[in-house]
Amino acid sequence: MRLENKVAIITGSARGLGRAFALRFAREGAKLTLCDVHDCEPVAREIEAVGGEVLALITDITSEKNTAKMAKKTVDRFGRIDILVNNAAAVGGIEIPDFMKPAEQLVAEDWNRFLEVNIKGTFLCCKAVIPYMKKQGKGNIINISSTTAFTGAPAFLHYSTTKGGIITMTRGLAVALGDYNINVNAVAPGPVMTEAMRVLVSEEAEKQLVARQILKRSIQPEDIAAAVVFLASDEASIITGQTLAVNAGEYMH
């Protein structure tokens, strides 16, 4: 098992990609803290059913107090933090049904929601775990971006802008934390039909997306999970400051 006895925090793990990450990490032997503003207990029960060790927390990543508690409770339970996966994000569909708008129709409230969760929230989670990782002399942070950061997304400029900011944050943190043996990387998924995306993208639209890819098949949550596990594993210990696009060749990065 590639993550045996490693302790990982996965944010946004009640459903979608976060759930896929949690289940794959558990199969790879990790001890897990699951965090979300939604109830993570159903996912935790899935993991416990196969013998995994898991802590489920309700966590608002935009709250510095909440993220600090997330890190402390993880250390109290498991003794350390080896991996942080920053997956929680404001996206369209379930969370923000009307988030697709022309740029000139966006208002400050639209921008604030995405900046608050995707940028500030990701930073606060990093800030919460960094002191523990520094003390250990080792750690691994993986931020979830999006290929919309590369391709542009005129109908959701606010979302794609924050995902570009995640890549910049990843590079800056990698430089800042390298002396402490802390790796920081990002994964940029292509279009994955999670619950939130399915609300926005019809089956016909999905076929059109697949047709633009080099590999003509739908990207699955498990495909993204495999990339995250690789970056979290010791096999990737020399990789830092990088963004891995997992998108079936939709965009060549």
Image (cartoon, rainbow, N blue to C red):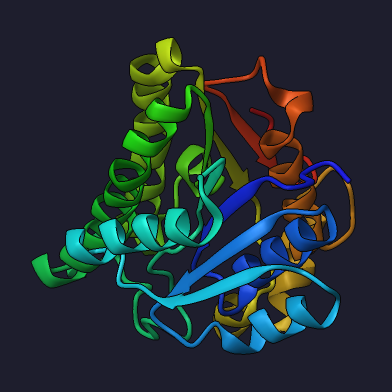
Q: Nearer the viewer, residue 114 or 35?
A: 35
Q: Nearer the viewer, residue 198 or 51?
A: 51
* Residue at x-position 65% and y-position 80%: 44
Q: Is residue 165 left or right of residue 24?
A: left
Image: 99 above or below 212: below
Query: Which image quadrant is residue 99 in?
Result: bottom left
Q: From this viewpoint, which residue is outermost toward the top?
A: 179
Q: Nearer the viewer, residue 77 or 242?
A: 77
In the rendered image, is residue 172 in sight? Answer: yes
In the rendered image, is residue 104 in sight? Answer: no
Q: From this viewpoint, which residue is outermost toward the left?
A: 108
* Residue at x-position 79% and y-position 25%: 235
* Residue at x-position 47% and y-position 70%: 35
* Residue at x-position 64% and y-position 19%: 239
Q: Is residue 250 left or right of residue 167?
A: right
Tell me residue 113's x, y (percent): 22, 68
Image: 164 above or below 205: above
